[in-house]
Amino acid sequence: MLRLRKVRVSPLVAIAIAVALALATACGRDAPSPAAAAASSGGKATRASAANGAAVLKVCNWSDYIGKDTLREFEATAGIRVDYCNYANNDALLARLKAAPGGYDVVFPTAHPYARDLVAEGALATLDKSLLPNLGHMDPAIMAELAEIDPGNAHLVPYMWGTTGLGVNVDQVRAALGPQAPLDSWGLLFDPANAARLSRCGIGIIESDTDAFPPALMWKGLDARDDSERANDTVRAVYAAIRPHIRKIANGDELIKGLAEGEFCVVLTYSGDVSQARARADEQSVQRGRKPLEIRYVIPREGAVRWIDVIAIPKGAPSPAAAHRFVDYLMTPAVIASISDEVAYANANRDASALMESSITKDPGIYPPPAVQAKLVGSGTPDAAQAQARRRAWDAIVYGSL
């Protein structure tokens, strides 16, 4: 399973959801209780938990964005129970943090603009690097990039990175556009003539302004990081021309399912999510005795956005020592390698690649070759007013008030 990334809902809805979740039992998963762990280890778990200052570590992460055994293995190693919960998008995470200050020990925001804003607001704890010996495994280039929004890398540790591109059902697209139709351009989606013909097999767009705007600007040959009102107008015009042909603007889970099951033939979404759709389609083809779908992830020749997700400890975290231990555990090369193998996203650990499956490290959609990486750009950094203006423009696209 892969993570369902960065889907955005209305901030008011996100806050309402977060408050409801805070009042309910939002966290938790099937894991041994502290008592059971202690019984199975001769009391070691209880003593280790006490030594780390907490019996429970509260972690909140994107859906399906960690290895199936990662948490249990950490619990067995550290003797600390992990109370684990998920969120569907960055806005929901921010709403959770506001609704329950001091309620979480470790979270995983996207660097731009979310973690950047959390750093600027003083909402994150300063890392005690003496407790993070595995920081030495981090990719210096990614650390330098994060230092632009987090001076001295004082608050953020890189987790995974990926790109936003096109998921393509090759057979369906060829049937709609012809066998020689190029698949390596944003024009596959944004050219109205193409969109009209692809509407019969289904176009899906990720429900996130931060991810849907840059591709439209790239297709127009403009700066993907332009957050001006003029850029918003351009993006609105691009989507207005294809909006009647879009089957659904949806969250990641819906796009993965739809691409895997043939509901969509072209989706604008995240690299790892297309990998999940492909794996799911392969499983279904075996179960049903059918020819597998050829699902391909495409980074268009005009370029794409590269994003970075980070690990952070919120200020006022109830168990900071245990939080540091968990963050350092995730930076262990073998641990992060196993997570990348499962979620199909690239990690920022320079010593993990040799431990990973070649199907991951050699997949150009996950680890693009240098020539493709040269065309990748970082996410924009809009200020508050620009972010609000872009969201208004996005709402007009989503709800058809163009």
Image (cartoon, grey):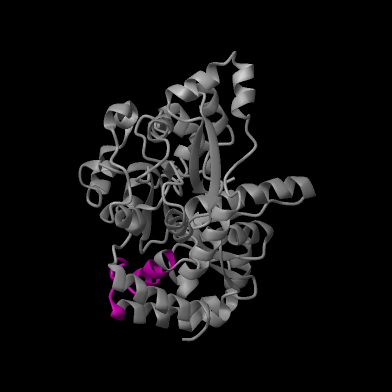
Q: Position of residue 60 (x, y in %)?
A: 49, 46
Would you say 167 lies left or right of 131 here? Answer: right
Q: On screen, 147 above or below 38?
A: below
Magenta residues, start to end: 211-230
Q: Does the magenta stretch include residue 217?
A: yes
Q: Can residue 356 be seen in this view?
A: no
Q: On screen, 117 above or below 350?
A: below
Number of numbered discs overlaid on the protein picture: 0
Q: Residue at x 59, y 55 (%)?
A: 295
- Name the foreground residue: 71 vs 214: 71
Q: On screen, 19 above or below 330?
A: below
Q: Is residue 267 magenta?
A: no
Q: Where is residue 75 in the image (x, y as percent from the top left)?
A: 53, 27
Q: Position of residue 58 (x, y in %)?
A: 49, 40
- Name the foreground residue: 193 vs 345: 345
Would you say 35 lies left or right of 366 here? Answer: right
Q: Which residue is drawn at 34% across and 33% down?
A: 350
Quarter holding the N terminus? top right
